[in-house]
Image (tube, rainbow, N blue to C red):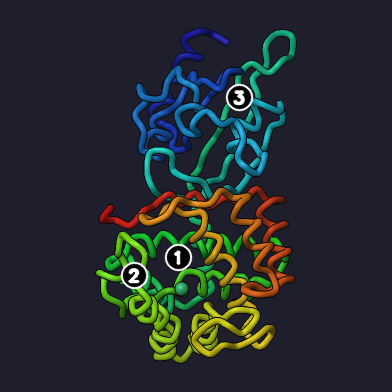
Amino acid sequence: MKKDIAYRIAQTIQTGLLHGVLVIDQEFKSVFLNHALCDMWKIEQQDVLYRSVVDIFYNGNLKKVSGDYQGPLIQTMATGQELSACEVYLNVPGSRESKWFLVSTFILRDENGLPEYAVGNYIVIDKFKMFETKLDAVNMNIIKAFCKAIGVRDMYTMQHSENVAALIVGLTEYMKLSASEVTMAYLAGIVHDVGKIGISEEILNKPSRLTEAEYEIIKRHPRKGADILQEVEEFAALAQIVRHHHERYDGKGYPLGLQGESIPWISRMLTICDAYDAMTSMRCYCEPHSIEEALIEIKECAGRQFDPFLSGIFIDFIRECNFEVGNQLAAENT
Ligand SMILES: [Fe+2]
């Protein structure tokens, strides 16, 4: 290929392409990243170029606690295996949010056929868009209004709700449940804490542990959330799920102390996803658990706090799918 054509193609990828492109060498140093990737990841080119992405984004850890490689591109460079159109829910490196990405990776080989560079192609996808088409516009707007209301009051809860929705969608897809069940699980994840709208910001964003009295107030949110949702006729089933997302399998939860399989099954899934995200997220008053620590905790609490059957599936799902919610979001006022 003529040199000037190669240069013009590189220029087009650099400035004109809407997909993010990142190229790393055998030492995981970035040798090329385009403008779209910088916009997507909220990073500056000069801060990343010719530096190890493992050092910059993952504190020098090539692998996650689970033993898997940090992201598809690093996995490709380390294993020599190209990946095609993986849907991954990743931390946006330069920000505090997580997004769904569609990632494909390619190997550039030297003259001896050995991997020299790995190329990652990143597209931000609106995975949740598909759920919107399943609801009529009015109901979807109501759900969006709830989300907005949660976000205005409490940024942590909004990101937490999105993480829980991503987890429960991943789990229900892993279990090969029907499209309508996956949709219901998604909605439940998004709105499960909507009852927190009725709780004072002082308590919601308290930077230290809650007192017993404050905890009693927090405990009202499943019932309040269900009451809000019940106002919309079509959300009756959703209200039921939200009402029971803090019940425990052993009957010691709230608000009704339901036990075992008398708790709606999506609520039982929600309880696990909710606890997992809370454990692995950065809150202002405690250090997050590692993925492995959180999974051990879920295993230990199976049969007491959590449905034992669903806990086992959840643990398999996180391990097998390498599913990671990248929530590092602390409360806004910290
Ligand atoms: Fe909750």
Does 301 sit above or below residue 284?
A: below
Say which of 240 and 40 sits in front.
Answer: 240
The residue lying toward the viewer, choosing from 81 and 208, is: 208
The residue labelled by disc 2 is 150
- Frontmost residue, 146 versus 292: 292
Nearest to N terminus: mark 1 or mark 3: 3
Q: Amino acid at mark 2?
A: Ile
Neighbourhood count class around disc 1 (C-alpha, 10 Å): few under 14, some 14–19, many 20 upward: many
**Amino acid type at image mark 3:** Ala
Mark 3 sits near ligand 1, with its Cβ under 8 Å away: no
At label 1, which amino acid type do we have?
Ser
Residue at 61 percent across and 70 percent down: it is 182
The reply to whether the C-beta atoms of the residues labelled 1 and 2 are less than 8 Å apart is: yes
Residue carrying label 1: 161
Picture quarter with the N terminus: top right
Distance between the Cα atoms at labels 1 and 2?
9 Å
The quadrant holding residue 304 is bottom right
Q: Nearer the viewer, mark 3 or mark 2?
A: 2
Judging depth in this view, the residue of 215 and 73 nearest the camera is: 215
In the image, residue 256 above or below residue 111: below
Residue tagged 3? 118
Residue displayed at 52% across by 38% down:
122
